[in-house]
Structure formats: C-alpha cells, structure tokens
Image (spheres, rainbow, N blue to C red):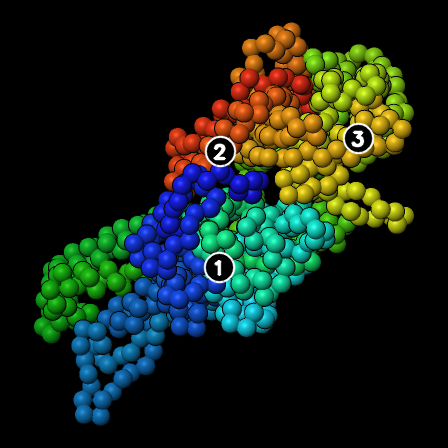
Amino acid sequence: MGQGDVPTAGTAAPGTAYREITKSPKPSSAEITTDNAAPSEYRQLYLNPRGNEVHGPFCTNVVITSKYTVWSFLPKFTVESFAKLANAYFLVVSALQCIPAISNTNGFVVVDDAHARRSFFSPDGMCSIPSSLPVLLFILAVDGTLAIIEDRRRHLADEEANSAKCNVVNRSTGALETILWSALQVGQIVKLDNRGTAPADLLILAVHEVDVDHKAGICYVETKSLDGETNLKLRQAMESTLEVQTEAEVSALHGRVECEQPNKAISRFAGSFFVDQHDGYIANHPISIKNILLRGCQLRNTEWMYGLVLNTGPDTKIMQSSAKPVAKWSSINGQVNRMIQWLLLLLVLLCAGSATAYVFWDNTFNAYACATAVPPTCYLSLETNSAVQRWFVGFGQYFLLMYQIIPVSLYVTISTVMFLQAIFMSWDLDMYFEELDVRMIVRTMGLNEELGQISYVFSDKTGTLTCNVMEFRKCSINGVSYGLGTTEIAALKRKGLPVPEVPVSKKGAKVPYVNFEDPRLHQKLTAIPLNSSTNWTKEAEFFLHLAICHTVIPEQATDKHGDAVLRYSASSPDEQALVSAAKFFGFAFESRGLGVARVRVTNKSLQQDASVSSELWEFKVLDVLEFNSDRKRMSCVVQDPNGAFMLLTKGADNVITPLLANDNDADVVAATLEQLQTFADDGLRTLTIAKKVVPTAYYHQWTKRYKAACASLDQIDKRKNGHPNEIDACMVEMEQDLVLLGATAIEDKLQDNVPRAIS
C-alpha cells in the first residue's frame, strides 16, 4: 500500500468496493466486465486490456485554449463588441440615418426608369448615408485586430502543445513508438525521459533505479507550470509495478484502475490500482497524488519513468483548473456605460419634448394668416399624416440632430489614451528589473486604469512581501528559549534599551538556511552522556525529529569549487530550513528510500561507535499523515533502528496543544507557549514539535484500519467533501497523548522597499 501490505481479510472482485485487502483471487473476464462493474461515479480503465475488456470512451488529448475559430470569430466578436453600450448606440444611429424620412444625411437620388419609388421611408426618392457607420467600423476593426493578435498567441501555444511528441509502449510489439501528444489515449503507457514534460495525467508505474538491487521507485518532479513552485517534489511508483524496468516487462503487466472522475484539485488524487500477480492473485494498492505525474509537470533528476495515462486533454487537472478566456472588462468601461445610459435618457427626454412641441405647433398651423390666404402664402406646407406618425418622425429627426451629445469619438479617445499609457508604462524605469533585464509588459491595455484605482491591496506575505528564503533563527526546547538572533536585538532597539553583545559560536559548520547563534544549545548537545542512543535528551530528540518528519528531497550537487555537496529541495522552504537546522546540529538527513529515511549522526555521544566520524542511521517511515489546511499539522509514524515505533508530529501551536498528554510538565508547556508568542511578536514563523512512543501491538492494529480506510474510495470521497470519515478518525486517534519537545522559529526577511510600498 505504498508503505507495506495490508493483511488479507477476504476476497473481492475488481469491480467491487475496496476492502482492507492486498490480494484477492483473480476473477474471470466475465466477472470484470458485467456483474461487478465499477460504480459510475468512478472512472475505470485497464492496463494492457485483454479479451473483451474495454474502457471509455474518453476525450482525446487535444487541448484548445483559444477563444475564437475562423467561423466563430465574427459572431462572438460582434456580441462582445455590442455589449459596449456606445457601440450599440452608434449602430442604432447608423440604422436611423438610413431612413430618409428622418435622416439629415441625404446624399443622392434613387430614380427608377419606370417611375420614382416614393414612400414614407424614401420620399422624393432620396437615399440617406449612415455617416456614423465608417467611424464605428474603424473602432470595431481596431478592436478586432487586437483580439485576433491576442488569440493567435493562444492558437500557437495550442499547436505547439498538440504537435509535441512523446514515446509510448506499443502493446502489440512491446517496443517504443513516437506519437504526437494529440494522438495519446487513455490506457496507453508513456515512457518519459529526464526533463521531459508529462503529456497527460500519468500513474507512475516504474522509474529508473540507480540501485537495481534495492528498488525504491522514487522520482522527482517539478510542478512549476501548475503551482509556480520551483522546488522539486518527490513522487513514487506503484509498489506492485516498480520492479519492471523494460518495455517488454511493462507490456506484460495487466491490471485495472478505479479512480476519481476528472476534477481541478491539483493537490489530491484518489483511486485504487489492481494488478495481476504471478501467483494468480490481484494486488490492490491505493493511489494518491504521490503516485501521479500531472500534465505539464517535468521529470527531474530521474533518467526515465513509465506512466499509465489516466486523464487526457480537457480531463487533465491542469485543464480542469484553467479558466476559459473571457473578454476583459475594466471599471472604466462600466463607468462609461453608466454615463451613456444617463446621457441617453436625457437625449430621449429632449427628443420627446421637442417632438411633442412640433406636433402641437403643427396642429395650430391653420391659425396663421398665411395659411388662410387665397392662395396660401406660407413657405411651409401642412403635413397630412396623422399626429402619431408626425410625432415619431419628429422624434427621429430631433434624435439625429442631437445624437452627438454622446460623442462618437468616445471609445477611440479611450483606446488611444490606453495605448499611450501602455507605451509609457513599458518605458518606466521604476518598473524595470535590472537583475533579470525585464521591463513591464502590458498584456491587456483595457485594464491600465485599474492600477490607478486600487484602494486596498490584499496580499499574502510569504514570497510576495518577503524573500521566501527561510532561516532557522531560534527555538524552544524543554521550556528553554535558544537563539540570540538579530530579530531580538531589533526589538530591544525599538524600546531604546542597550544592545547586548552576541557571542559568536564556533560550533557547527556553516549551513545554508541557518543563522543561529547560541553556545548554550551546543553545550547541551555535547554534554550528553557517551553512547546514550537509548536514552536521548530532549535536545537530541528535538533535532532528530526535524531530520525525519518532513517531505524534503536530498540532492547530490557540486559547489562553485567543484566539490560534492548535499542540497535539500523542498516544496516548503520552512521544511528546508528545519532540515538544514538538524544538519547544523549534527543530524544530517542524507537520503531517502522506499519507506526509509537515512540520517547521518555526527554527535559522538549518540553514536554506537564513538571512534568513527559519523554513523548512518536508518529509520523506517511507515506512515505519513500529511499536512493540510484543515489539520494544520503533519505526522510520521517511524520505526527506529532498535525496532521501536514512535509518532513524530509538528504543526501550529493551537492545534498541537490540545493533543498533548496530561502528564506533560505544565511549567514547560506554559513556558513554551509564552516563548512562541515572543517569537511571533518578533515576526518569526513558528511550529510546535511533539512526539510519542507507539506500542507495537497497537500500531499493527491501527495501521490495518488506516490502510483499509485509505484504500476505500467511499471514505476518500467523504473526506474530500468534508464529511466524517475513517481516514481522519484514524489520524486523530493516533495523534493523541503527545509529549511536547519544543518549538521552532524561522525568519523570512522582507524584500527591499516593501515597508515603503505598504506604508
């Protein structure tokens, strides 16, 4: 089950709900495809299907992020353009100018050879010219050109992605063949090389092993295209298939996957993997996000891997989480629309009043002396149409006379100003970043004015306001605060108190992400009785905890002098700093295997053989209870070299404190919480560290229930939807009666000019 097998409790056909089993008798093909079909809420697919095993249909791997096509551009762009009230207004004006009875833009006479066509809409055979139409067409042409240029970039990106090539294992021949990403289908097996990008969501079957005698199934991936993080993350092949190392061996596999339906949650994945075994049984292992390589992620520091395609195209998580391109609509457009509505209302009132006065004056025409004279001497003739008809004609005439109360150049002026703003923004030296030679780029001119209308800025702190470079500065162990860092000195300076001289410790080599000075802690660690590996002090337990309970990936690299160095890559820079602190104090996390963490101990007092420079201790990491925003803590169940089981937990103080055992020293707990508050007041990031010893019999009973819950899609769905479930219940049950070890304090300094920017 990723960390170990679950004891067999019975048999189950592969279509049934998951139980607490690892192996079940191999069913017949008929049982797989008919009676015990997977529930419709789960996606089912086969690894190298045989006989009448059929999955799908599933969508293709073609990705389309563009907004328009050749055929859809004109209708879509027309709808978007006339959503702007001014454009719709001038379109109406242009249409009204084509009606000769009310038009004031008569241009030429239309005469039929037989007879002149005269009517209410073309009296005297006159044809009107829509004088506002050329300007409107020019505005639409400019907007349409910009829309085409922007969407063309999306088309080029789609074409590049769909025409990329990948290697897949031919199920018939067992050989590799190269196909386009767009031709990739669910159920195919992809071979991805180092630094290759995943063409779809892949279940990791096997990876290249450096040590073929001790296969670990571990690879590293970069998820920058999904979450923006450049730190490498660890991924693990499925335990039941990590032994395969050739295309022929991969082609010989046969199994089935039941997993969640496509969704946009990039940080989680739920499913179960059934694989035929040589003894005729079927191995059942749960699938988590640790076994998945999502589309867009890059394989790193691993020569190759085999992956089963689970989701393609629009079903991949990166496409599920991406929003469709929409028309950008700035606040100034909304304000212009509202102003136009008021101006239009005023125009309608003026036209209605003028048309009413015109009809009233027309009805009194016969009272004038020129109208009663014989013959009439008036230079105007009386209209013979009805009063209603004359009112509407008059309304239209006055409308076209006064329509320019809403200027036709409004949007042209706004677009010109935005274009000039974009030029000046790109020229602004204050927006130029010299280190990367990058200037400001205006991608959407319609949103320029939004920058000047910001009243409040809601920003996260880490990596935005701060450098996102964590340094271990202070800690609290067994109620004693350690660390004489500059943050504490800065607090004294603000109070006007004298600054004490900080003694410089000569203990410990310089380690990145550690800026710690306090000789008292070094003395505590060196004062441990010789060969005390069975009776550790709180200080030793504290740093051993930091060296084991994490998800950091160690990498072998070379420094600027060409010497080999060990570097840590972590999804969280906090963990990177904590593991570096453990190394600084003599507990160096060195490597990771399948369910194993290796720590090199340089403290002579803790070594079994004090005559050697260091000892490599191997701890079995049996279960990892991962951190999430609800739990606010992370735990590991590990087995030490002596065979004892223990739980290591770290998390927020308000979460860990209620989980502490009643027999904790109350004075130590109170002192630690007070020091945590002091650390927080100094702007440090804090974590609480705790542990407990787990009885062997209880652990075996607990892990059976926990792994069975993790393999149940029903329990996974409940947990995903926030309902009570056995997975969380098992975690909470294990994380009880903890012993407090201490707390850590990490500094993340503000970036340059941040105080000035937010003041």
Asked if residue 118 lies left or right of residue 467, the reply is left
Task: Identify the residue under disc 2.
Answer: 704
Residue 664 at x, y = what percent?
61, 11
> Can residue 738 be seen in the rendering of this structure?
yes
Query: What amino acid is labelled 1 in the image?
Result: His
Residue 26 at x, y = what percent?
42, 53
Residue 495's place in the image compared with 403, above or below, is above
Residue 60 occupies quadrant: bottom left
Residue shown at the point (53%, 24%) measured from the top left: 698
Residue 420's place in the image compared with 759, above or below, is below
Q: Pointer 1 and pointer 2: residues touching (CB < 8 Å)? A: no
- How far apart are the two marked residues, 1 and 2, measured between alpha carbons? 26 Å
Task: Identify the residue under disc 3.
Answer: 601
Element class at badge 3:
strand
Residue 6's place in the image compared with 732, above or below, is below
Asked if residue 724 lies left or right of residue 300, the reply is left
Residue lying at the far front of the rendered structure: 279
Element class at badge 2:
helix
Task: Identify the residue under disc 1.
Answer: 254
> Can residue 517 be seen in the rendering of this structure?
no
Q: Residues within 10 Å of mark 1 (few under 14, many from 20)?
A: some
Q: Residues within 10 Å of mark 2 (few under 14, many from 20)?
A: some
